[in-house]
Image (spheres, rainbow, N blue to C red):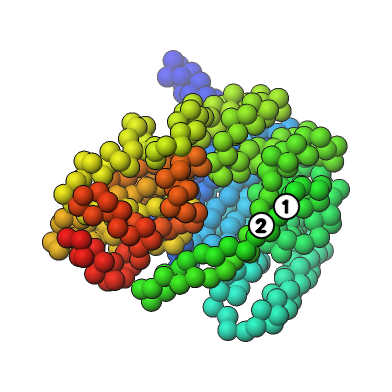
């Protein structure tokens, strides 16, 4: 009798645990091993994640091909949450709306995730909408034209036509599914608006079309909606924006070549103020926009980011979010960020050093310095080449030092581990905005490479990168 009673209690406990959480059951797959790299980009971000109902906090899932249960303190009134599963292709992502208590099996068919909700009935297209309809996000204009030999005018016309076709196909597909009762109204609306909002974001046009959503919190949690409200605020409420033509350098066939690029410069301090004073947005949407603006100020290493962080606290009482932002962006080291007479560096333990100290330690060797960041695709594409050179006999008297201008400490640390950079030679630049050293050398774009001779003297402030043998020739001049 006691055994039966215990079993009943245990079963009830397990049911309570499951009903209060969302359980993911991953079927065995090598998908996650292969998906770290695609043709054009390395994926460091988790392939599977949940987004909170404000669209700010992300829960990354460390997939280990096993059953995992997740509890959420931020579920909205309907106890639902959005799960995102990235595909290997950069423009393909599955969105699944899950409810508290759901048990979801995730299997992989032909390399794509396939979801089955085990505890409740769903209509055929409520899940796996993207894979079943082949309606993935349209690609960005950059991806569309990067290999094109057509004129800019022709490319713009073709790109516009492609996006128009996507809109027609999205609407006709969803209308057809609804007429056959193959998708619920709730999910049909979610998938339609998700696709249309994504299209607005990449085409950067007619943001007023979804203006009626600015006072509704229904779409919070959709990544596309988060980008949309930010784009709306940036383009439709009079934020100060300037455009400049910048000359950048790119390594082509082993040679550094100049190319001009128009840069859009948003005054994010002005944007913060205008969003604060606007009545267009619901309080939650306003908080979402202000947080994104705050992140952009941090990304630009703005020296006033701590001031705007204090302003943001009026709109957010989530202590976990605030503490994480403060930690990620090293706000506790704000005094170090203001130092202008040297280049301040942190190692992975936040131990302080400087470029002068590193050159002093490595006197007697040629030093190659690589300025990079976790978000810079060309930077990361070049890293394996220099890592290979480290172990070559002819490069034994060359020290390769990696200096990241990342603004989020953990992003830098995780990427350093992911790329297998030597811990003792990898550092985060703490004061990139204030440093006169960087300003004098005009370090405004990355990747950027420099060479110091055995005496620690800068002999090449804009070297070729490691993807070509020309770098070896350059380094050997100083050996």
**In the rendered image, which quarter is residue 358 located in?**
top left
Q: Which mark is residue 241?
A: 1
Compared with residue 127, is residue 345 higher up or lower down, i.e. above or below? Answer: above
Q: Does 460 sit left or right of 101 as displayed?
A: left
Q: Nearer the viewer, residue 96 or 53?
A: 53
Q: Which mark is residue 156?
A: none
Which of disc 1 and disc 2 is earlier in sequence?
A: 1
Helix, strand or loop status at disc 2: strand
Compared with residue 97, is residue 262 higher up or lower down, i.e. above or below? Answer: below
The residue where tag 2 is placed is 264
User: Do tag 2 and tag 1 residues touch (Cβ < 8 Å)?
Assistant: yes
Helix, strand or loop status at disc 1: strand
Report, in whole angstroms, how far the alpha carbon at label 2 lies from the one at label 1: 7 Å
Q: Quadrant of the C terminus?
A: bottom left
Q: Nearer the viewer, residue 392 or 479?
A: 479
Asked if residue 126 can be seen in this view, the reply is no
Tell me where residue 177 appears, x and y as whole percent: 76, 64
Q: Nearer the viewer, residue 192 or 372?
A: 372
């Amino acid at each position: 009798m006691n055994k039966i009673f215990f079993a009943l209690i245990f079963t009830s406990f397990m049911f309570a645990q499951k009903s209060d959480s969302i359980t993911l059951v991953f079927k065995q797959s090598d998908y996650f091993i292969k998906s770290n790299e695609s043709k054009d980009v390395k994926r460091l971000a988790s392939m599977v994640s949940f987004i909170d109902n404000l669209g700010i906090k992300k829960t990354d899932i460390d997939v280990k091909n096993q059953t995992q249960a997740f509890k959420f303190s931020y579920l909205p009134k309907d106890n639902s949450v959005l799960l995102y599963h990235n595909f290997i292709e950069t423009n393909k992502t599955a969105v699944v709306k899950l409810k508290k208590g759901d048990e979801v099996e995730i299997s992989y068919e032909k390399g794509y995730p396939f979801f089955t909700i085990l505890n409740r009935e769903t209509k055929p297209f409520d899940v796996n909408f993207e894979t079943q309809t082949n309606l993935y996000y349209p690609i960005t204009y950059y991806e569309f034209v990067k290999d094109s030999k057509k004129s800019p005018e022709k490319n713009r016309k073709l790109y516009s036509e492609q996006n128009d076709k996507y809109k027609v196909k999205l609407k006709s597909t969803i209308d057809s599914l609804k007429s056959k009762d193959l998708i619920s109204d709730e999910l049909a609306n979610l998938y339609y608006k998700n696709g249309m909002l994504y299209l607005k974001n990449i085409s950067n046009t007619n943001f007023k079309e979804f203006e009626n959503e600015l006072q509704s919190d229904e779409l919070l949690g959709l990544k596309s909606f988060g980008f949309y409200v930010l784009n709306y605020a940036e383009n439709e409420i009079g934020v100060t924006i300037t455009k400049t033509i910048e000359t950048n350098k790119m390594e082509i066939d082993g040679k550094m070549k100049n190319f001009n690029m128009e840069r859009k410069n948003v005054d994010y301090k002005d944007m913060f103020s205008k969003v604060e004073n606007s009545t267009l947005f619901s309080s939650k949407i306003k908080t979402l926009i202000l947080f994104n603006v705050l992140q952009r100020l941090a990304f630009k290493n703005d020296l006033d980011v701590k001031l705007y962080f204090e302003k943001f606290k009026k709109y957010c009482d989530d202590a976990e979010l605030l503490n994480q932002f403060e930690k990620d962006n090293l706000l506790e080291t704000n005094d170090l960020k203001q130092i202008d007479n040297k280049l301040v560096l942190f190692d992975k333990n936040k131990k302080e050093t400087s470029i002068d100290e590193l050159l002093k330690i490595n006197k007697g060797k040629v030093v190659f310095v690589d300025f990079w960041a976790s978000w810079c695709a060309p930077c990361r594409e070049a890293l394996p080449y220099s890592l290979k050179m480290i172990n070559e006999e002819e490069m034994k008297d060359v020290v390769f030092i990696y200096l990241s201008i990342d603004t989020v400490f953990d992003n830098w640390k995780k990427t350093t581990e992911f790329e297998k950079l030597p811990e003792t030679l990898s550092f985060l630049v703490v004061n990139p905005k204030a440093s006169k050293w960087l300003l004098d050398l005009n370090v405004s774009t990355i990747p950027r490479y420099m060479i110091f001779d055995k005496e620690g003297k800068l002999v090449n402030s804009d070297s070729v990168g490691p993807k070509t043998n020309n770098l070896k020739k350059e380094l050997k001049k100083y050996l």
